[in-house]
Image: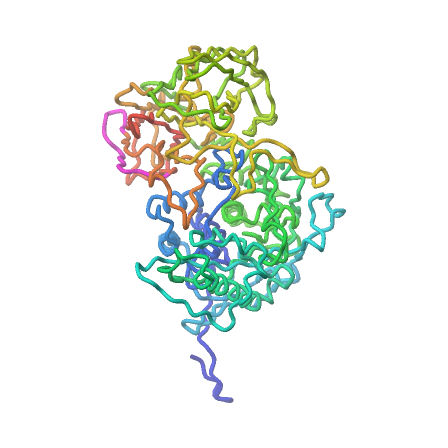
Amino acid sequence: MKVDNSTGRRSFVSKEIQADLVVTGGGLSGVCCAITAAREGCSVVLVQDRPVLGGNASSEVRLWILGATSHMGNNNRWAREGGVVDEILVENTYSNPEGNPVIFDMILLDKVVAEPNITLLLNTAVYHVDKKNETTIASVKAFCSQNQTEYVLHAPLFCDASGDGVVGFLAGAAFRMGAESREEFGEKFAPNKEYGELLGHTLYFYSKDTGRPVNFIPPAFALNDITKIPRFKTFNTKEFGCKLWWIEYGGRLDTVHDTEQIKWELWKVIYGVWDYIKNSGNFPEAVNLTLEWVGTIPGKRESRRFEGDYMLRQQDIVEQRLHNDAVAYGGWSIDLHPADGVFSEKPGCNQWHSKGIFHIPFRSLYSKNISNLFLGGRLISASHVAFGSTRVMATAAYATQAVGMAAALCKAHNILPADIIHDDLIQPLQQRLLSTGQYIPGLSLHDKNDLVQQAAITASSELVLTELPEDNFLKPLELSVAQMVPLNEGKVEPFIFHAQAKTATSLQVELRISSKAGNHTPDITVATLTLPIEPGRNCLQVKFDAVMKEQAYAFITFTKNPLVELHYTRKRVTGLLSVFNTINKAVSNYGKQTPPEDIGMDAFEFWCPQRRPEGHNIAFKYPAGLPCFKAENIGNGIDRPVNTPNAWVADWNDAAPQLTISWQQPQTIGTIELFFDTDYDHPMESVLMQHPETIMPFCVRNYRIKDDAGNIIAEKKDNHQTRNRITLSKPVQTSQLIIEVEHPSADVPAAVFAVRCYDK
C-alpha cells in the first residue's frame, strides 16, 4: 500500500515486470503461445482475467476443444493439430478420459506452471496500454482483484489472445466487427443483415441424477413461455453441456459491451428450459434430476477481429489456397450462426466444409499498424466468413503456437513481427515449427543440425503389407464403405476381398482418389467394377485397370448393399483406415454436401471413419505388397500420414523390433527426439465426451535406446505422448543408436514417425 502524505490518499501496490513477451488471455490459445515461447527461451508473462486457464474450454464455460478433425465428421484425415495443443489433448485423454472440465483446468495449470520461463498472473485484467509512439506498445497495466495489486508489464513484444482484443483495442490496432459485404472480398457466403453479422454467446448447464425425486422452483426471471424457442420440442433429459451449443444469444447486440445483458438473457433461457424439463409433465424421467451446474461466464464466439497484413477469406478455405508464409492450418467448416440464436426460426448453424485443410498465413497473425503486437486466438486477421472456420479453439491455438515461436525468432534477431516476412525469415520460422511437431501442409522438415540426416537408417524389419487377415468377423454393407490404402505411383495391382451372401446379388466396387494432393476426399472415380455375388462365401478378385499418377491414398470403395457382408479384420496399422459414407449431424454432415449454387462452396461426399471400438479395417490381400513402411521414413521430415503413412512400421512377426541409426564416425549426442503415433485422426474432445481409450492403440508405450557398446542411455515405460524429447544428463559419444521398441499390442505393430538427434 502507498499513501500520499499530502492528500492522505492510498493506492494499491504496484509491481513492474519485464519480459520478452506479454501474452494477454489465458484461453487455450494464450496457453499454447506462452508454453511454446517459453520453451524456446523467451521470458513470458501470461495474463488471465479469470481464476483458471482455458477460456471457453475451462470449467467456467465447458466447451469441448475441436479443430480440423471436426468430430471425425469431415474428410480431413489425420488432421488433429500438433505441437503443444496436441500434447495437452493427449495428456487430457490419458488423465481425464471422462472429460471432466475441472480436471482439464488442472492439466492446463500444471502445464503452465511447469515452465520456469512463464510468470502466470491469474485474476488479472489488462485495462491500460502505454505506447512509446503511435505504432509501438511500451507496456500494459493490469489489476489483480484478489491481491489488490497493479502490474505494469514491459516487453518488446505483445500477443493479444484475449478474445475481445483488449490490448489491440487500447493500443489503437485496426479492427472490425460484423460481417463484410459480398463485394469486399468476393465472398459469396457473406451473410446479409436479415441473417445477422455476429455470432452470439452461449451458456451451458449440467444435470445430475440424485437417485431420489427433486423439485425445481424456477426463479422469477426464468423464461416462462418455452414456445418462444422455436426448437423447444428438441429439448430432452439426455442432452446437456455443450451438446446444447445452440442455446445462443446476442448476435444483434454489441458482443463486447453488452455481454452482461446477453448473459442475463441466457440465464432466463436456461432456467426456463430446466423449468420446462422438470415441471411441464412431458419428461417423467426427469423426476430424479437436479440442475447441477449453470455457467456464469458466457462462451463468446465473436467480437472484434483485428487486421493484419493479410485477411484470410472464404476462397482461402474453399480453394485451399497456398501461402508461402503458412505457419498453421485449419479445417473446421465455415460455421456461421443466425444472429437471433436460440430465438431464430433458422437452423442453429450454417456449416459448409471444404474438401481438405487450408493454410493460415503468418501475415494474419500480427497487427498491420501496431508494430510489436501479435494477434492470437479467435481475433486473428480473417473476414467474418473465414472466421467462421478459424474461430474454433484447436485451430486458434494452433495458429497462436506459431506466434510463440515467432516471438522467439524476433527475440533472437532483435526484430519485430512483420520483419520475419520482410527479412526473409519465414522459412526458418516454418522449420522451427515443424521440428516441434507442427505440421504445415505441403512442407517438410529439413534440419541440418539433425544428426539422423547424415546417418544410415536400418531396421530389424519393415512391414510390407500383403494382407490384413480375416478374423471370422463380418459386417453387412448397410453403408457404403471404403478401405483407404496408400499406393505408390504406377500400376494398381489386384486386391482380394471376401464377402458372404445368402442370396445372389451384385456388388459395385470402385477405385477412387482425391483430386488434390494431400486431401482425403475421394472425389475422382478412376475405375468401376460390378462383381457377381453368389450365395455363400465369395472370393472377390478386384482388378482395376488403373495407374496411380503419384503416390497417394486410394479408396477401394464398396457401394451399399445390405445383402452382402464383408470380412473385416481386428488388425490396425498406422496410416490405414476404413471410411464410411455416413451421416454426422453434429457437423452438418448428411453424407453429401450439396450447397446452393450461389454461396461459393463445393459439392462432395463425406467419407468418414467410425470411432473405436468400431472403424475396423476391411480384410484384404494385396499380393504385390504395400512397401510404404520403410525405416527411412523416420527422417523424411513429415511426422503424420498425408499422401502415405510417413512412418516406419515393424513387421508383426518381428519379436524384438528395433531401429539402428549408424554413422561412419562417432557422434556426440545430447538430445534425442522420437515421434510416435497417437492417432491424429481421433479428435480428442476435451470435455463431456468419454473416449474409447486412454492411450491410442498405435502408440509405442515401451522403448529403450542403446549406444554402440550396448549401454542403455535412455528408457521409457508407459509412454502415451506423441513427442518424446530426451535430454541426456551427459552427452554420449557413439557411432550407433539402437532404438528397441515393443509392439503396442498383438493386433497393432510398432510404428515410429520420426527420430531426431542433436549434439546438445
Q: Left of 76 or right of it: where is 657?
A: left
User: Looking at this view, is 272 or 8 the one in front?
Assistant: 272
Main SS category, magenta section: loop
Residue 718 magenta: yes
In the rendered structure, the answer to whether residue 59 lies left or right of residue 524 reads left
Is 11 above or below relative to 497? Answer: below
Residue nearer the viewer, 723 or 606? 606
Q: Is residue 103 visible?
A: yes
Residue drawn at x 36%, y 31% as measured from the top left: 698
Span colored in magenta: 706-721
Residue 449 falls left or right of residue 324: left
The quarter of the rendered structure image containing the N terminus is bottom left
**Magenta stretch encompasses residue 159:** no
Q: Quadrant of residue 599?
A: top right
Residue 354 coordinates in the image, percent (x, y): 60, 37
In this rendering, the answer to whether 392 lies above or below 146 is above
Left or right of residue 702: residue 345: right
- The residue nearer to you, when weighing 165 against 475, is 475
Q: Position of residue 310 (x, y in %)?
A: 66, 46
Count the numbered circles shown. 0
